[in-house]
Amino acid sequence: MTFNSKIFRTSTFRLAAIYLIFFAFSVSAVLAYVYWNTVGILERQTDETIRAEVQGLSDQYRLLSLAGVVDVLQRRIDEGAGSIYLLANARNEQVIGNIDKLPASASGEPGWVDFPIVVGRPPKQQNHTGRAYHAPLPGGYTLLVGRDVEEQRLFGKTIRQAVSWALALALVLGLGGGWVLSRNFLRRVDAITDTSRTIMAGDLTRRMPVSGSDDELDRLAQSLNDMLGQIERLMAGMKEVSSNVAHDLRTPLTRMRARIESALRTEDDATHKQALEKTLEDSDRLLGTFNALLSIARAEAGHSREGLAETDAASIVHEVAELYEPIVEDAGGTLTLDVDASIPVKADRQLLAQALSNLLDNALKYGVVDEGEATAVTVTAKAVDGKAVITVSDRGHGIAVADRTRVLDRFVRLDESRNKPGNGLGLSLVSSVMKLHGGSLTLGDAAPGLLATLELPLLPDSKTA
Ligand SMILES: Nc1ncnc2c1ncn2[C@@H]1O[C@H](COP(=O)(O)OP(=O)(O)OP(=O)(O)O)[C@@H](O)[C@H]1O
Ligand SMILES: [Mg+2]
C-alpha cells in the first residue's frame, strides 16, 4: 500500500491526472457535439416533418371538410412507409387510421406523445416506440400523426454506448499511462537516492545511473556525476598535496634539526652564529613554500573571485618589470618590453602581479643555456580579439613538449633544474591564478627558450586600438 500511495504522490502522476481531467473534458465535449449532430439532428428533422404534416392536414380539413381529409389519410395509410395516422371523434373512436385509439396521454392541448406500438403481423410482431403529435380539429375531432422511431432510438442508444465506452477507455488508458509513467519515474529516482546513500557512506567512486535517454532525470544524474567527479578530483589533489608537503618539508626540517644539534655540541661562538644564519635561511625558504601553497589554495578556492576588480593589466606589467629590471641588469642581461597603452581586465592585481613575477623569476633562473651567459627576457602585453595576452619569453633550454603539462603540478621540478633553488610551486600558482581569472597559462617554444603565455578575458568596454 505504501508503494501505491508513493506513486500517487509523484509529480508525474499528478501531472498525468490533471492532463487526464482536461483530456476527459475535451473528449466529452467532442462526443457531445457528435451526438448532437447525428442523433439530435435526426430527431429534430422527424419532429419538423410531423409538425408540417399535421399543419397540412389541418388546413385540408378546413378546405375539404372531413370526407376530404379521410380520403387523403386513406391514401397515405395505403402507401405504408412507417407513418402512424389516427383521426378520432369526440368519443375517441377511430374514424380512420392505422392505430385503434389515441394513446392515453394524448388528450386536451396539442402536443407530443411517445407511446408503444406493435408492428408486423403475428407471429413476427415486434414492440416499437412511436412518436406522434396530436392536435384537435374543429368538430371535436382529434388528429394524430406520428412515426415509428424505433430505429432512431436504437441508433441513439448505439451512439450513447459508443460514447460511454470511448470515455471509459480514455480514462482507463490515461490512468494506466500515468501509473506506468510514475512507476518508471519513481524507480529511477529511487536508484538515484540509493546511489547517493552509498556515496555518502564513503564510496566516492560510485556514480548515478544514467539511462541514456537524455531526459531531465538523465541530465540531473549527469550533472550530479560531474559534480562527484570534481569532488573526487579535489579530494585526490588534496591528498597528494598533503603528502607532497609532508615530504618536502621533512628534508629541510631534518637538516635544520641536525645542524642545531651539532652546533649545540660545540662551545665555539662562530659555529653557533653560522648555524643560526643557515637556520634562518632555511626557515625563510620554508615560509616561502608555505606562502606559495597558501596563495595557490586561495586562488584555487576561487574565494577571491569577488576580489576581482576592473584594472589595467598594462600597469601591472610595468610595475613588475620595474622590480625585475635592476635584477636582470645586475646579471648583465636585458629586459625588453612591448606593452599596449591600456589593457582593461577584471583581475586581482596582487595575484596577477605574483603570477607575472613567477614567470620572470623562472626566466631569470632557467633563461640561459650556459652559466654566466647574459639573459634576454622579453615581456609583451597586448589586447587582441577580446583577450588580454601577456607573454614572457627567454633564451634558455625551454621545456620539452612532454613536460609542459606536468610542470604545472605542485612540487614538480625538472631534473636539469635540481641545482637551482626552488620548490616547483611557481608555475602551479600561475596556473591557478589564471584559472581564477577565467583565463589560461600556455607553455610554448620561443625557439630557443620558453614562451609562457597568459590569457584572460578583456573587459568589453575596451578603448584599445
Ligand atoms: N623558463 C624556463 N625555462 C626552462 N625550464 C623552466 C622554465 N620555467 C620553469 N621551468 C621548469 O619547470 C619547473 C617548474 O617551475 P616552477 O616555477 O613551477 O618551479 P621552480 O621554479 O622550480 O620553483 P619555484 O618557482 O617554486 O621557486 C622548473 O623546476 C623548471 O624545471
Ligand atoms: Mg619558478
Image (cartoon, rainbow, N blue to C red):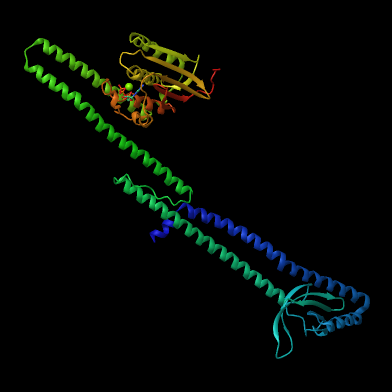
Residue 59 visible, this angle: yes
Q: Quadrant of ligand 1?
A: top left
Q: Position of residue 34 (x, y in %)?
A: 68, 64
Q: Nearer the viewer, residue 291 or 244?
A: 244
Residue appearing at x 78%, y 84% in the figure: 99
Residue appearing at x 33%, y 8% in the figure: 330
* Quadrant in which the N terminus is drawn: bottom left
Q: Nearer the viewer, residue 232 or 251?
A: 251
Question: Which residue of the protein is positioned furthest toward the front in this rendering?
Answer: 370
Q: Residue 42's image quarter?
A: bottom right
Question: Which residue of the protein is positioned furthest toward the right in this rendering?
Answer: 63
Q: Position of residue 442 (x, y in %)?
A: 42, 27
In the figure, 465 relative to 440: above or below? above
Q: Nearer the viewer, residue 141 or 187?
A: 187
Q: Position of residue 372 (x, y in %)?
A: 31, 13
In the figure, 306 relative to 376: above or below? below
Q: Position of residue 257 (x, y in %)?
A: 14, 22
Q: Residue 137's image quarter?
A: bottom right
* Quadrant in which the C terminus is drawn: top right
Residue appearing at x 79%, y 72% in the figure: 110
Residue appearing at x 43%, y 28% in the figure: 440
